[in-house]
Amino acid sequence: MKVRVYAPPLADPAAIDSDGFVTLPEGATLGELFATLRVPLRPLAALLCMVNWRRASLRTKLRDGDTVGFVGLLPGG
């Protein structure tokens, strides 16, 4: 299955193809996607992650065509 990924800054982009998709086995979870992307601090990254514009956990099962993105934190004051 293919999942569109808007990866966080510290992820390894090697698994993302030129169209922005990562290929995963059917039934893969968000945690498995994070492992594929070598995302550091996975539990913390999951707090900032959205699947199809909804909050998700590391156990969230992904489906073909899902979109995975991250909420950006803006520094400032």
Image (spheres, rainbow, N blue to C red):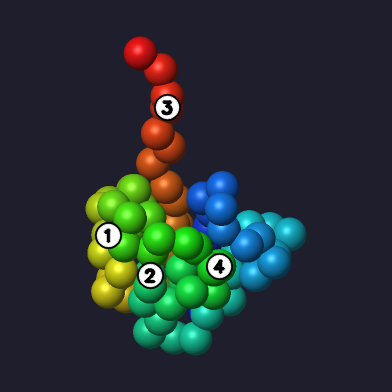
- For the residues bearing labels 3 and 4, Cβ distance under 8 angstroms: no
Precedes in sequence: disc 1 or disc 2:
2
Mark yes or no: residue 32 visible: yes
The local crowd at label 2, few if under 14, some if 14 to 19, many if 20 or more residues have their Cα within 10 Å, is many
Q: CA distance from mark 4 to mark 2?
A: 11 Å
Q: CA distance from mark 3 to mark 1?
A: 21 Å
Q: CA distance from mark 3 to mark 4?
A: 23 Å
Left or right of 18 on screen, residue 26: left
What amino acid does circle 4 point to?
A: Leu
Q: Position of residue 1 (x, y in %)?
A: 52, 79
Precedes in sequence: disc 2 or disc 3:
2
Mark 3, residue position: 74
What amino acid does circle 1 point to?
A: Ala
Precedes in sequence: disc 4 or disc 2:
2
The local crowd at label 3, few if under 14, some if 14 to 19, many if 20 or more residues have their Cα within 10 Å, is few
Q: Nearer the viewer, mark 2 or mark 3?
A: 3
Secondary structure beneath disc 3? Answer: loop
What amino acid does circle 3 point to?
A: Leu
Mark 1, residue position: 56
Precedes in sequence: disc 3 or disc 4:
4
Secondary structure beneath disc 1? Answer: loop
- For the residues bearing labels 1 and 2, Cβ distance under 8 angstroms: yes
Q: CA distance from mark 2 to mark 3?
A: 24 Å
